[in-house]
Amino acid sequence: MTMNEASERYSIPIKILKEYESWGLCGEVKKVMGMWQYDDTDLERLSMIMTLHDIGFSKKEIECYMRLLLEQDDAKTECLKMLEQKRNNTLDEIHFKEKQLDRMDYLRHEMRKADRIK
């Protein structure tokens, strides 16, 4: 499958495919007649990259995660730490947003209560 075919079929931006190639993590990707060819393993890796992107990993974090996963036998522990850290950061953001909503709701309540008093 070529880069354009992979991009269209799996909705993976060309930019991400080029980054993937630049990281040197495309184990089985071969250049045939001037075009990259992706196999199922590459597509699985690209799916992982898209998932990491969707959950908020930066490009640098994705590259680090993928290198750990693909180049080290004991990488699962480090990858799990990265996922735990991202999860904790996300929970912190959610809690902060919940506090913001509570404050907004309080202000809305106070304004409505003041309108009823008049």
Image (spheres, rainbow, N blue to C red):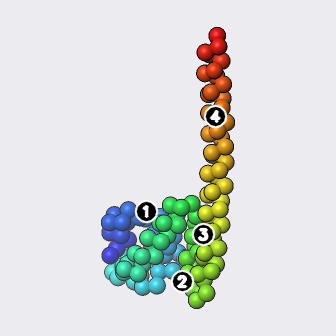
Farthest-out residue, bottom = 73
Disc 1/disc 3 C-alpha distance (Å):
23 Å
Amino acid type assigned to the residue bearing label 1 in the image: Pro
- Near mark 1 (Cα within 10 A), the count class, few <14, some 14-19 or many ≥20, is some
- Near mark 4 (Cα within 10 A), the count class, few <14, some 14-19 or many ≥20, is few
Query: Which circle, 2 or 1, is nearer the viewer?
Result: 2
Query: Which circle, 2 or 3, is nearer the viewer?
Result: 3
Among numbered discs 1 and 3, the one appearing first in the sequence: 1
Query: Which circle, 2 or 4, is nearer the viewer?
Result: 4
Q: Nearer the viewer, residue 89 or 36?
A: 89
Farthest-out residue, top = 118
Q: Nearer the viewer, residue 69 or 63?
A: 69
Disc 2/disc 4 C-alpha distance (Å):
46 Å
Residue 83 at x, y percent in the picture: 60, 69
> Mark on residue 13?
1
Disc 4/disc 3 C-alpha distance (Å):
31 Å
Disc 4 is placed on an element classified as helix
Disc 2 is placed on an element classified as helix
Residue 100 at x, y percent in the picture: 65, 41
Disc 1/disc 4 C-alpha distance (Å):
38 Å
Q: Residue at x 66, y 55 (%)?
A: 92
Disc 3 is placed on an element classified as helix
Location of the C terminus by quadrant is top right
